[in-house]
Amino acid sequence: MNTGIALLAFAYVLSQFFRAFLAVLSPFLATDIGAGAEDLAFASGLWFITFSIMQLPIGWALDSIGPRRTAATLLLIGGAGGAAVFAVASAPVHVAIAMALIGVGCAPVLMASYYIFALDHPPARFAFLAAVMVGVGTLGNIVASYPTTLAAETMGWRAALWGLCALSAATAAGIWFAVRDPVKEPTEQKGSFAEVLRIRALWFIFPLMLVSYAELGALRGLWIGPYLTEVFNASPRLIGQATLAMGITMVIGPMAYSPLDRMFGTRKWVIFVGSIGMLLATIGMILLGESSVIWVVVLMCAIGFFGSTYPAIMSHGRSLLPRHLVGRGVTLLNLCSIGGVGIAQFVTGRIYASTAGSKFASIPFSLILMFFAAALTVGLVIYLFSTDTKPDKA
């Protein structure tokens, strides 16, 4: 791992942090600026929507101007700029604007890494490197848990956001000077998104990509906080500890999936069986919604572990892409993944708003989980018709 890749990995740590820290800050934001669960669901949804919309121009930019300038410029303007807006927020709408900007800033960093992996490394290494990047980046989920709670209690959340603004700016500058763009052949064929969409086999992967990370991102990014607060009257510290536990499983999960395709000689069935594990854990939460905070946290950790199929699905999709379509192809797959979370946050925010104040505190969250279970089931049924690809030998 050279300095440039290390800086992109750290930028992805920031990306994972920003998509997950609202769950921990929810009690502080409710007290200080009156931001409720529906407000934060909307702000979180904007992060994922702007992130996903940016995948199309980023796909073009990676193929046209390279990952160095693409990642550095957007992280500086969106990441550092959005953190600054968040630090001075005085109303929920300011948080929404900040999260939209941060989504723009975080959008290119993982795809820049995947672009470099795909063009500068053998195909057999892609799944492993992709999993390592996600595993390292998911450390941001850990920082966006108990440590963030402690920071908010000691220095205050505004000071913490100013620190993140400076860190984002410094990382962007480092990427500009340290990342090296892959060397492309002068005669290399130009590609287009239309050409990617003409690859029929990808259409059976897109739906699972749309729904699998949607649940994981929505629960860890927001709903774990309001769930534990309203159903179990959990303290901010307990929420921080629960999100820490879920974050750890999301670090372990991608690394656990990484060798399985070569071990079993299949990409498709590793992803399918893991997704079934996620579905069963979701059903368990629906059935045991108010039974015990320990059981709920254990099941959320199971969702975090089994739901960490993102690098594996990305590897399956990458195996169907010719070299000249890698930039546009992986960003289109990522658009499905991140866009799915954005859509889910808007939908689940409305579900919560329409059922808040029910006789049983767990009802809004049970309905949210039913939505995720139904979406995942549809995605898995379509994925059954996908074309399996055998992993390359290392």
Image (cartoon, rainbow, N blue to C red):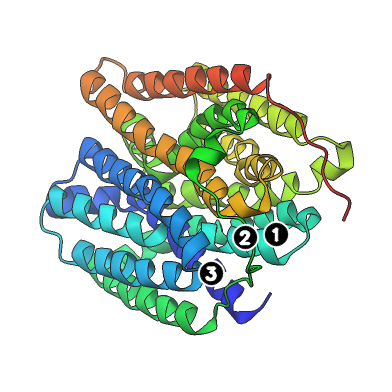
> Looking at the image, which residue is at 59% across and 74% down?
6
Judging by the rendered image, the residue that carries numbered circle 1 is 129
Which residue is identified by label 3?
8
Q: Which amino acid does label 3 sit on?
A: Leu
Q: Residue at position x 61%, y 55% from top? A: 189
Q: Is mark 2 on a helix, strand or loop?
A: helix
Query: Which one is in front, 43 or 296?
Result: 43
**Residue annotated with mark 2:** 133
Residue 223 location in percent, x, y? Answer: 37, 37
Q: Are marks 1 and 3 in contact (CB under 8 Å)?
A: no
Q: Nearest the camera: 112 or 14?
A: 112
Taking 191 as reference, is 383 left or right? Answer: right
Vertical order, 15 against 31 (above or below): below
State yes or no: discs 3 and 2 in contact (Cβ < 8 Å). Answer: yes
**Residue 225 spot, x, y in % from top left:** 37, 42
Q: Where is residue 35 in the image (x, y as percent from the top left)?
A: 18, 45
Question: Residue placed farthest to the bottom in the image?
Answer: 177
The quarter of the picture where residue 172 lies is bottom left
Structural distance between the alpha carbons of marks 1 and 3? 13 Å
Look at the image and tell me whether residue 357 can be seen.
no
Do the residues bearing badges 1 and 2 touch, measured as CB atoms within 8 Å? Answer: yes
Answer with the quarter of the image where residue 368 lies.
Answer: top left
